[in-house]
Image (cartoon, helix red, strand yellow):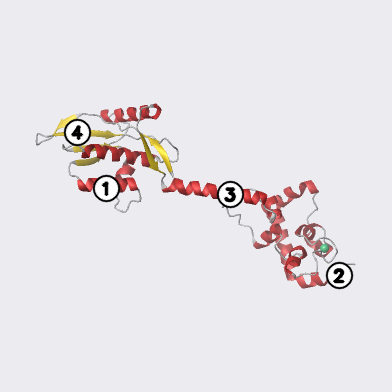
């Protein structure tokens, strides 16, 4: 996976005399701006340093490179850095002896640094700026893969046949844990001691309740005379979805469902054996 970064290496040419009478060339490296938002600022800063190092390698004089990016300089000090750009710079510095790096505070009027910023801003809109192709950072690739997986999951969830009672509650896929108690999960998914569910596995003679109605969680919570004590007021058809949501959001309603499920589970054999009138 690759994307494109446009950059312009800002170089200012202030020359100063060294004590030995030699000349060193100062390069001021500014923030470069990623062409794609998927490339990170960190990458852009490191690339600017990398280009400055390449430039310095072609010169025999001592070169000191000033960067205002502390994170980049720290990355270069880290011998276990995961960044391929950082490792490239480390190798380059290891093999050359004329390059020194230093940190410079940004936006405090250093002539070279200000010029470098100005050139970097120009590079954003310039059609003549050099263009680099840089692999996406690991974090961006992970984010991209996560979004693709979620989108695929969402399409499958939207089009699925199973799990529709849960779909009414949670239409959007995601990694958030709803922290529902076990009994509420059983009620919402229907995967509990309900005839409609037990029947699917041959653990109930029919998918109807002993009272003759469809043995669904909704029936148990609103209509079945065997669970009268735990009844909620039966909502109109058009309000069922809102009612289900209110169960997950309101503690008292939720507790009533938990009590209902505990009762059904503990009385399963009795409820199953009861015959319709
Ligand atoms: Zn019933």
Alpha carbon separation for disc pair 1 and 3 = 40 Å
* Label drawn at residue 176: none
Point out residue 23 in the picture as x, y percentages from the top left corner.
14, 33
| Sequence-first disc among 1 and 4 | 4
Q: Residue furthest right?
A: 277
Callout 1: helix, strand or loop? helix
Per the image, the residue denoted by label 1 is: 90
197 lies above or below 127: below
Callout 3: helix, strand or loop? helix
| Sequence-first disc among 1 and 2 | 1
Per the image, the residue denoted by label 3 is: 152
231 lies above or below 268: above
| Comparing labels 1 and 3, the label whose residue is closer to the camera | 3
Point out residue 222 in the picture as x, y percentages from the top left corner.
80, 57
Label 2: how many Cα within 10 Å (few below 14, some 14–19, many 20+): few
Per the image, the residue denoted by label 4 is: 25
Alpha carbon separation for disc pair 1 and 4 = 20 Å
Alpha carbon separation for disc pair 4 and 3 = 54 Å
118 lies above or below 179: above
Alpha carbon separation for disc pair 4 and 2 = 96 Å
| Sequence-first disc among 1 and 3 | 1
| Sequence-first disc among 4 and 2 | 4
Callout 2: helix, strand or loop? loop
| Sequence-first disc among 4 and 3 | 4
| Comparing labels 4 and 2, the label whose residue is closer to the camera | 4
Label 4: how many Cα within 10 Å (few below 14, some 14–19, many 20+): some
Alpha carbon separation for disc pair 3 and 2 = 46 Å
Callout 4: helix, strand or loop? strand
| Comparing labels 3 and 2, the label whose residue is closer to the camera | 3
Q: Residue at x 27, y 33 (%)?
A: 28
Alpha carbon separation for disc pair 1 and 2 = 81 Å
């Amino acid at each position: 996976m690759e994307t494109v970064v446009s950059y312009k290496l800002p170089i200012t040419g202030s020359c100063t005399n060294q004590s030995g009478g030699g000349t060193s060339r100062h390069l001021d490296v500014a923030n470069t701006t990623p062409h794609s938002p998927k490339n990170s600022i960190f990458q852009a800063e490191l690339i600017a340093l990398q280009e400055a190092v390449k430039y310095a390698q072609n010169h025999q004089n001592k070169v000191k490179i000033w960067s205002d990016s502390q994170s980049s300089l720290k990355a270069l000090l880290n011998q276990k850095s995961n960044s391929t750009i950082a490792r490239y710079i480390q190798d380059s510095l290891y093999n050359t002896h004329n390059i020194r790096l230093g940190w410079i505070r940004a936006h405090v009027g250093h002539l070279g640094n200000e010029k470098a910023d100005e050139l970097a801003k120009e590079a954003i809109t310039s059609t003549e700026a050099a263009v680099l192709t840089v692999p996406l950072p690991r974090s961006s690739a992970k984010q991209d893969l996560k979004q693709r997986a979620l989108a695929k999951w969402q399409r499958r969830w939207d089009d699925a046949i199973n799990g529709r009672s849960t779909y009414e509650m949670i239409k959007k896929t995601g990694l958030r844990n709803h922290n529902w108690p076990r009994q509420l999960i059983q009620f919402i998914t229907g995967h509990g001691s309900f005839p409609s569910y037990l029947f699917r596995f041959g653990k109930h003679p029919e998918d109807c309740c002993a009272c003759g109605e469809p043995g669904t969680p909704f029936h148990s919570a609103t209509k079945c005379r065997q669970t009268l004590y735990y009844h909620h007021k039966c909502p109109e058809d058009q309000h069922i979805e809102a009612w289900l949501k209110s169960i997950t959001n309101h503690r008292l309603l939720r507790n009533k469902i938990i009590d209902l499920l505990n009762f059904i589970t503990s009385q399963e054999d009795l409820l199953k054996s009861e015959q319709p009138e």
